[in-house]
Image (tube, grey):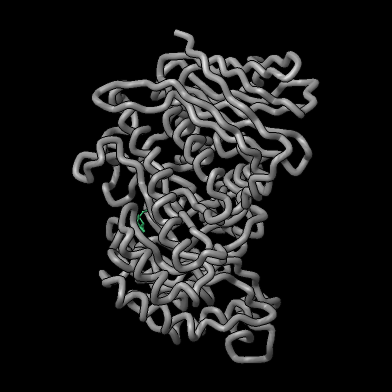
Amino acid sequence: DTLRADAALKADENGGTISRYIYGQFSEHLGGGIYDGIWVGPDSKIPNVRGIRSDVVAALKDLHVPVVRWPGGCFADEYDWRDGIGPRDQRPVRKNNWWGDAPETNQFGTHEFMDFIDQIGSEAYLSVNVGSSSPKDMREWVEYMTSPGNDTLANERRKNGRDAPWKVAFWGIGNESWGCGGQMRPEYYADEYRRFQAFFHKSATNQGLKIASGANAEQYEWTDTLMKMAGGEMDGISLHYYTLPTGDWNAKGAATGFGTDQWVSTFARTLKMEEIITKHEAIMDKYDPQKRVGLFVDEWGTWYDVEKGTNPGFLYQKNTLRDAVLAAANFNIFHHHVDRVKMTSIAQTINVLQAMILTDKDKIELTPTYYAFKMYVPFQDATALPLTFTAPQYSAGGNTIPAFNASAARGKDGHVYIGIANMDPADNIVLSVDVSGLKVTKVGGQVLTADKMDAANLPGEKALVAPVDYKGGKIKGNQLTLDIPSKSVVVVQLN
Ligand code: AHR
């Protein structure tokens, strides 16, 4: 069927800047996320530059990835940064206790990560080990990376091949400190956070922001305690929220082969992001009304049952049209919170959870989620524009969702963009947008959809989901009419 809806765009109002960091990535030492995914080693037959695979670099460059969070995740709170520096053939092999007991060869360490960041033109967000290490360890890593002086750690960095200090945009002080990062109570972590950050020295070459380990989903009390006890000492606090189709960690739901009920339950759960952010914001507003402290949603995305036949500790899952529409729906939510949400990183870039890229030996495939990120590139550092609308509803299996959500912005190129996630699996939507005050001569853009809800792109197979030019828009006077196919992502460009 075709549904109708109305919207109004306020093109002359400034809704704040959409930080480019909202389009960040998270890459952990987990499964094929780093090894095979990024690092193949300099001797590999797979084309690479200093061990980093060139096909992946080219794809990520195109995505304008603003920041990458590394090395974890849970892995970060067992990571010894010293294991990953110096001659590669002398680095220790450790057991990756969190992720499938895989041997961690440490071939990819600080220098290799920063090389990767340079190659893709991005910035670094490093997670510091708080759970099983000390402030001394953190202080030395910071000094090793950022000191410009003639001190022993900076000279060690030079000996290992890097002369100039590196710029690190963000430092995460612990990860999930309530869970895998040390099972701490909020009061205890708040004190730990205060202690660690006291030895984190900002300097001319270290302007990195300090990010506290934040809450999981609806753990509001964690944010409250942290903001109360340590809010003044942090630049940001994180938030993790994963989307499980069923909400049950023991039977999350499959990545493919699902029906309409599970499509709808997945969206019902992911849209909770709006409420979760709003409630954490309200707590932060209480202690930080000037909105100095950013909310960093540094883990989000879909988490399905692992693909049959793969190591359950590697969190490998297929990626379908559902993931792309879900990514866009979350972008639209983040755009409504730009005064507080300063950064997000999706879990995870390659071969893990809601990935941008899947690799299989020398083959790579760009996922539907990759394309959603690509379509939304014009929103990076754009000015949000208020867009009001009333969405019809869609119900199945006991859940009701709005048929679509949307957001608008004026890009740095001067064009106005409207991003729409049509979450309705069955109905096209004809959206009439009042664009009074805006002179529109051309309506273009891109649309991403497919015949099936679970259409996927897999390495070595024909890609089923990729964006094409959008031809469904018309302008007549102040009235913009957009024909939005069911289960799709549309980014409209107004010239
Ligand atoms: O992204 C996978 C894991 O999920 C991360 O390591 C951890 O922080 C979270 O629980």
**Image position, residue 121 (x, y; %):** 67, 55
- Does the rendering let one see residue 299? yes
Residue at 65% from the left image edge and 82% from the top image edge: 203
**Residue 353, picture quadrant:** top left
Residue at 66% from the left image edge and 23% from the top image edge: 434
Eyeballing the image, is 346 above or below 74?
Answer: above
Along the line of sight, which residue is nearer the eye, 218 or 452?
A: 218
Residue at 28% from the left image edge and 47% from the top image edge: 311
Q: Is 415 positioned to the left or the right of 92 in the image?
A: right
How many tags in the picture? Answer: 0
**Image position, residue 33 (x, y; %):** 44, 51
Quarter for ligand 1? bottom left
Along the line of sight, which residue is nearer the eye, 442 or 258?
A: 442
Along the line of sight, which residue is nearer the eye, 462 or 196?
A: 196
Q: Is 46 positioned to the left or the right of 260 in the image?
A: right
Eyeballing the image, is 253 above or below 341?
Answer: above
**Image position, residue 394 (x, y; %):** 37, 21
